[in-house]
Image: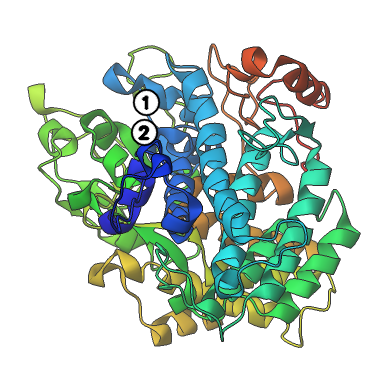
Amino acid sequence: MKRTLLYISLGVAVLVTGCDKDFEDINTDPNKTIPPNFNSDYFLSGSQYNYINGITGYNGAILFQSGWVQIFSSTSSGAATYYSNMDKYVASGNTNDYAGRGFDLGYKGARLAQEIIKNYGPVPATPPKTDKTNVVSAAKVMKVLCMQYVTDLYGDVPYSQAFLAPEPDNVTTPAYDKQQDIYNSMLSELDTALLNFDTTKPKPVSDLFPYAGDVAKWKKFGYSLMLRVAMRLTKADPATAQKYAEKAAAGGTLSSVSEDAWIKGDNPDGYRSENSRALITPADFYSVRWSKTFMDYLKANNDPRVTIIAEVPDTGLANNSDILRLTGNNSYAIQLGQPNGWDLNGGPTDIKNSTSYPGGTGSGDNFTPIGKYSRPRAAIYTNLNSPQFVLTYAESELLLAEAKARGWNVGATTAAAHYAKGLSAALQALTPFGGSAALTPTFADAYAAAHPLDVSSLNASLKMINEQYWATTGILLNFVEAWNNWKRSGYPVLTPIVYVGNFSKGQIPRRQLYPTTESTTNPANYKNGVGNLTGGDDWLSRTWWDK
């Protein structure tokens, strides 16, 4: 990763072939590289890196969505007050900063993808470079991936004019496009890009996904992304949702766990897994636990992933808080989720006042009140080289199960069969975390067969499918996707936390606030964007598709 990302971090790749005393050479800025001397392919890894950096760690999701949809829980007191954003919807000192990071990193990722498109794509009367068709197509897929992330967080955002600076257009205050228009544009752009992938042409290089530029896998990834984009619209625009879900299925979505899209951390070279980095920060290591809502769901379904992902720390405060004491007990029977909305402040919301409080562990100065609650298993989640997930075969099959349950033409496979494939794949998706996380296909298939889809009614099917989607994306720490699909589907049904001083009127937030800089650097267009939100720039305002 270091080799490829240097092109992004340094911003130059000067290929010296010789020199002379020509005036033009002497007066050329040595810190800039003209397109003929720069391999724009390397922007692909930069786009991927910025996207994964945006959806992981302290750049938003772990401090917001992880608790909003009750995957994580935190007692968030002492040094870890920043977790009050997610667990209690109470602002910390840097809440506005955290809220704007998805905007910044999403656009960085999209901008790097756009540079590939601009440098290799067509200009008036000039065809694109035919040997670059695959990297351009991959860049278009990445642009959509990044921009869906941004618009789903905030609502209306710049799109049609977002990448027209600095030249030749020099648009520095881009208009905010309506989310409906952004979605229509993303689907159209995906459609074009996926048709242009060509296995007979050179494959993309500098690919951080485990595809190594494999064009067939990139195409499947793109169609699975099209499916995900389409399914966001099941309430806002069912006709468009059906049209593109069917097109995605016909084009060919991800077809095995081996095609899951994730990016592995590369800590020795400075590109660590940000979720893991957060979880081994001492205050986080102590206070972050799996939520009661989440763990209760898994155990109600006798889910075998429980013993892979969860552990109860060894007895006492030191074993709970010292990041060098990574051992814990992962026995199924003792795993217990921590309820959301509690603290360690000694008042009425202290965790010891919870009706389900099991007691603490240790004694005296070594006592901890939260010692019996399950934390993310250290052997799986604290490795700074761990995988960070983007989109999986399991998610794709679960969305196809829903599409089929709705009666859409997404192939001959039944909704129940898609669900079984998705559930089996969900269990197998943990394999990139290492051997201790692996479940065999035979075991996973057997579990899926023993837990078939409830087809007694459409609502019963939708509930089961989307609860599993929430659980799977939660286990893979893709918190933003879990939250977005919860907003769309309404599943699982969650009880909001009502905590003193919360910023969302005791309701689960449905968007993030625009970056504070937008109101000063792009005021007129920011005002238009806010004006299209019922309730304004507020945590509870719903974006267009969030019905």
**Amino acid type shown at disc 1:** Ile
Q: Is residue 108 above or below residue 124?
A: above
Which is more toward the observer, 479 or 272? 272
User: SS for tag 1?
Assistant: helix
Q: Residue furthest right?
A: 239
Which of these two is toward me, 92 or 525?
525
Name the quadrant of the N terminus. bottom left
Residue 301 position, x and y percent, is: 50, 64
Compare residues 168 and 386 and report the one nearer the observer.
Answer: 168
The residue that disc 1 covers is 351
Q: Which residue is mark 2?
A: 357
Circles 1 and 2, Cβ within 8 Å, touching? The answer is: yes
Which of pointers 1 and 2 indicates the residue nearer the eye? 1
Q: Residue at (39%, 23%) from the top-left corner?
A: 82
Kindly indicate the quadrant of the structure image that contains residue 393.
Answer: bottom right
Q: Tell me the crowding category of disc 1: few under 14, some 14 to 19, or many 20 or more residues within 10 angstroms, Cα based.
A: many
In the image, what residue occupies the spot 81% across and 56% down? Answer: 234
Indicate left or right for 397 with 267 as reference. right
Using the image, tell me which numbered label, if any, was put on residue 66.
none
**Mark 2 Cα within 10 Å, few/some/many (few <14, many 20+)?**
some
Can residue 76 be seen?
yes
Location of residue 415 with respect to 482 vertically, above or below:
below
The vertical placement of 479 against 31, above or below, is below
